[in-house]
Amino acid sequence: MEEEKMNLRLDLDVQKLETEKLKKGKNKADGDFDSLKTDNKKLCFSMRTVGLGKISEKW
């Protein structure tokens, strides 16, 4: 019985560690995605400012 409890605790600890690892990965991915969105907005604004948007619309 005690051995079974210990195994369950170990399983729970492993699951907690895996969950933390996944959350960290998700947070990093979210940060990267936000950075890409910001870069895209800056690029679109620059293209509009320079007038490249009009040229690319013709294609």
Image: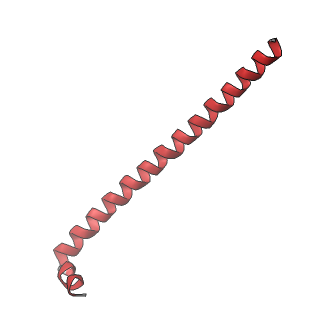
Residue 36 coordinates in the image, percent (x, y): 37, 60
Q: In the displayed structure, does residue 27 sit left or right of residue 51?
A: right
Q: Position of residue 39 (x, y in %)?
A: 33, 62
Which residue is found at the position 77% from the left and 22% from the top? 7
Q: Is residue 32 above or below residue 48?
A: above
Rendered residue at 67%/26% (across/down): 13
Residue 38 vs residue 9: left or right? left
Q: Residue furthest bottom?
A: 59
Residue 13 position (above or below residue 58): above
Write the residue at 42% across / 49% down.
31
**Residue 3 or residue 45, whichever sits in front:** 3
Above or below, comparing residue 16 to residue 1 in the picture: below
Residue at the (25%, 69%) spot, across then down:
44
Tell which of 17 and 51 is nearer to you: 17
Q: Quadrant of the N terminus?
A: top right
Total numbered labels placed on residues in the image:
0
Q: Residue furthest top?
A: 2
Query: Horizontal placement of 3 versus 32: left or right?
Result: right
Q: Residue 45, relative to residue 7: is it above or below?
A: below
Q: Residue 21 in the image: x percent, y percent?
A: 59, 39
The image quadrant where one finds the C terminus is bottom left
In the image, residue 8 lies at what x, y percent?
72, 22
Which color mode does the image show? secondary structure
